[in-house]
């Protein structure tokens, strides 16, 4: 018998097996806890609870390490593409040349939306938030392919995966165009994934538009580093909805809504809003740093530190260099970017931030890059959703293929009223 954990309760000792992951992380399996003891665990936020065993992503917050299917994120950001990384996450291995060509082909030729979906956009009010529109339209795809949603049919799942990855950039770009009243463009099959999206975002029928290769590369890298991040809020939402055997479109729609929250996908938007606040109050960065260090002051520096990473976020190392490349190429000074660079310079050298390991995180730099590439702030979480899509799909697919598949059903500790009688209305005070 392997390693176990013993629990003593009411004079009895119970043993639970220890499960060890391939990278050394350990847990003890409490799946029989309630049946053996009548107890459940109470873990608000699930900070000490493993909801599944997974082969997709590993992160070590203390070491600042992130692996996709065992491959370091640094290698993928430098050498891979978002499409290839998506294949890796979903299918478990890097594709052969033929597999990558076939995958790319499907993503290219499934990128158009049914013309009737444009009527759906017309039903939204003026200037809707692109994140709300994106999630709603993704969920609506189930109505267009309702005869191909069997979550136990491998072929139907394959087609749905292709459709979803291919169409999300089109849906996202249309959501933006709707919000500013511009016509909805068609995809361009001659362009790669990131370039095609940027053209749909920023081109108009009035004049030619050429995608900047550095901008497209920057977006591709940003999509890669956001592609998966273990059992975060939105990923857990996709898994929980998918555990009812719900189709992939609906499950991902739920994940997009979960991502929209300011504590999750909205963090990089909060960075830009903070920079704007600093700019509007005179751009005095040193004073803002002093305010952030004052425990009595409610002001906080957004984009510093991370809930999981207690060391430098490996993703921020990657895009820090990219952010500086983009800003250098711009050649002109932009107030918010200037403030961001000054803030980065101070905070990375200040002993207060260094000792507390409050390093600039991925949200700090991604917000700067999105701003430099002229993406509006309300599109930041949509871009995050585009990047996270392969991870959501991989996690959903892994769940459906799990031999121990179960519908998610968390327990609770009830703290409400005990049993009491119904009081007729006329007798209530």
Image (spheres, rainbow, N blue to C red):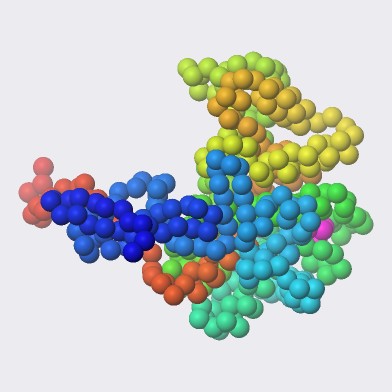
Q: Is residue 422 above or below residue 282?
A: below
69 and 281: which one is in front? 69
Based on the picture, tell me whether residue 197 belongs to the magenta stretch: yes
Image coordinates of residue 305 in percent, x first then y, are 58, 34
The image quadrant that residue 141 belongs to is bottom right
Q: Is residue 162 left or right of residue 400?
A: right
Can the viewer see residue 133?
no
For image coordinates 73% across by 71% down, the residue present is 95
Q: Is residue 216 above or below residue 318?
A: below
The number of numbered badges drawn on the structure is 0
Can the viewer see residue 220?
yes
Q: Is residue 190 left or right of residue 282?
A: right
The image quadrant that residue 404 belongs to is bottom left
Quadrant of image for the N terminus: bottom left
163 and 112: which one is in front? 163
The majority secondary structure of the magenta stretch comes to helix
Based on the picture, tell me whether residue 181 belongs to the magenta stretch: no
For image coordinates 67% across by 45% down, the residue present is 315
192 and 101: which one is in front? 101
For image coordinates 79% across by 66% down, the residue present is 187
Q: Is residue 328 above or below residue 100?
A: above
| Residue bounds of the magenta highlight | 194-199
Q: Is residue 96 above or below residue 185?
A: below
Image coordinates of residue 100 in percent, x first then y, are 76, 72
Image coordinates of residue 44 in percent, x first then y, are 36, 46
Q: Is residue 83 left or right of residue 49?
A: right
For image coordinates 61% across by 83% down, the residue present is 155
238 and 403: which one is in front? 403
Quadrant of image for the C terminus: top left
Image coordinates of residue 16 in percent, x first then y, are 30, 58
């Amino acid at each position: 018998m392997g390693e176990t954990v013993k629990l003593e309760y009411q004079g009895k000792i119970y043993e639970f097996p220890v499960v060890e992951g391939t990278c050394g992380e350990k847990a003890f399996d409490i799946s029989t806890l309630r049946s053996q003891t009548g107890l459940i665990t109470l873990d608000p936020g699930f900070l000490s609870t493993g909801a599944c065993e997974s082969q997709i992503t590993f992160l070590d917050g203390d070491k600042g390490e992130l692996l996709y299917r065992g491959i370091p994120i640094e290698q993928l950001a430098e050498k891979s593409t978002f499409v290839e990384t998506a294949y890796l996450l979903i299918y478990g291995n890097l594709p052969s040349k033929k597999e990558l060509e076939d995958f790319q082909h499907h993503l290219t030729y499934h990128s158009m939306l049914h013309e009737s979906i444009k009527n759906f956009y017309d039903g939204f009010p003026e200037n809707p938030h692109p994140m709300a529109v994106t999630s709603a339209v993704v969920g609506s795809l189930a109505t267009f392919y309702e005869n191909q949603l069997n979550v136990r049919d491998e072929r139907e799942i394959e087609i749905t995966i292709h459709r979803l990855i291919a169409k999300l950039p089109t849906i996202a770009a249309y959501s933006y165009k709707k919000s500013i009243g511009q016509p909805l463009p068609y995809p361009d099959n001659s362009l790669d994934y990131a370039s095609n999206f940027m053209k749909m975002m920023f081109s108009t029928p009035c004049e030619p538009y050429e995608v900047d290769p550095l901008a497209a590369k920057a977006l591709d890298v940003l999509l890669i580093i956001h592609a998966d991040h273990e059992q975060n809020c939105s990923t857990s939402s996709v898994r929980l909805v998918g555990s009812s055997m719900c189709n992939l479109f609906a499950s991902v729609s739920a994940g997009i809504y979960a991502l929209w929250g300011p504590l999750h996908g909205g963090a990089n938007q909060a960075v830009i809003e903070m920079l704007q606040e600093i700019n509007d109050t005179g751009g005095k960065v040193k004073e803002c740093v002093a305010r952030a260090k004052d425990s009595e002051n409610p002001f906080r520096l957004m984009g510093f530190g991370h809930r999981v990473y207690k060391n430098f976020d490996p993703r921020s190392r990657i895009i820090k260099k990219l952010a500086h490349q983009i800003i250098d190429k711009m050649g002109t000074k932009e107030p918010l970017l200037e403030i961001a660079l000054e803030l980065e310079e101070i905070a990375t050298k200040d002993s207060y931030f260094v000792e507390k390991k409050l390093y600039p995180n991925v949200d700090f730099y991604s917000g700067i890059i999105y701003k430099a590439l002229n993406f509006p702030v309300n599109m930041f979480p949509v871009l995050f959703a585009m990047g996270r899509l392969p991870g959501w799909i991989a996690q959903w697919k892994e769940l459906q293929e799990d031999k121990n598949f179960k519908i998610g059903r968390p327990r609770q500790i009830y703290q409400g009223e005990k049993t009491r009688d119904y009081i007729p209305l006329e007798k209530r005070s």
